[in-house]
Image (cartoon, rainbow, N blue to C red):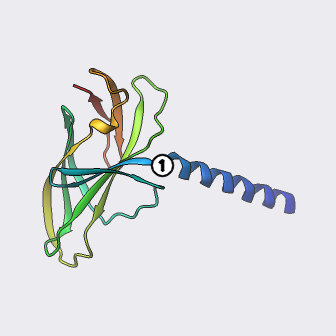
Amino acid sequence: MKNITILFFVMMLFACKNHREMYKNTSAITTENTMKTIGTLSNDTTLSDPFEIQEATITGNKLLLKISYAGGCQEHSFQLIGANQISKSLPPIRSIRLIHDGNQDACKAKIIKDIEIDISELCYKNETNSSIYLQLQGWKENLLYIKP
């Protein structure tokens, strides 16, 4: 019984490490309306304030999102992160996640906002017609991105 317990903990240790490695050095795009900056994140433990994705579409190199959240007293910012690891399907799939920072806004008004994010950094290959599915956490279906 003792050996099984030790084996279980060793397996959990490796499983957790692999999950963290998936998002290590992920691409990050920060947006305030249509502005962006590119950076990297060390892991996927970034906390997000609550929000809901109402609509998600891709037009050209832009991810267009309609989101809702509670607030109204502070400026809110959003950051899109994408895993560097891509599935080996055709077309490939990249996991992406939107992070919401409400700046400790205590107000409760329902805000609906349109966000436009340049996703050209998330393409599969930097070639015209290169395609990839973006799997947005919190959205029901994959979004097909074809680089124009």
Q: Is residue 87 visible?
A: yes
Q: Is residue 83 left or right of residue 116?
A: right
- Residue found at the very far top of the displayed protein: 129
Q: Position of residue 6 (x, y in %)?
A: 80, 60
Q: Position of residue 138 (x, y in %)?
A: 33, 50
Q: Residue at x 33, y 37 (%)?
A: 122
Q: Is residue 44 left or right of residue 5?
A: left
Q: Position of residue 61 (x, y in %)?
A: 21, 34
Query: Of helix, strand and loop, which one carries label 1?
Result: loop
Classify residue 128 by image quadrant: top left
Classify residue 109 by image quadrant: bottom left
Name the amino acid, label 1: Tyr
Q: Position of residue 112 (x, y in %)?
A: 13, 59
22 or 141, nearer to the observer: 22
For the C terminus, give its image quadrant: top left
Residue at numbered disc 1 = 23
86 or 127, nearer to the observer: 127
Q: Residue at x 60, y 54 (%)?
A: 16
Q: Is residue 1 visible?
A: no
**Can you say whether 135 is above or below 138 in the image?**
above
- Residue found at the very far bottom of the displayed protein: 106
For the N terminus, give its image quadrant: bottom right
Q: Residues within 10 Å of mark 1 (few under 14, many from 20)?
A: many
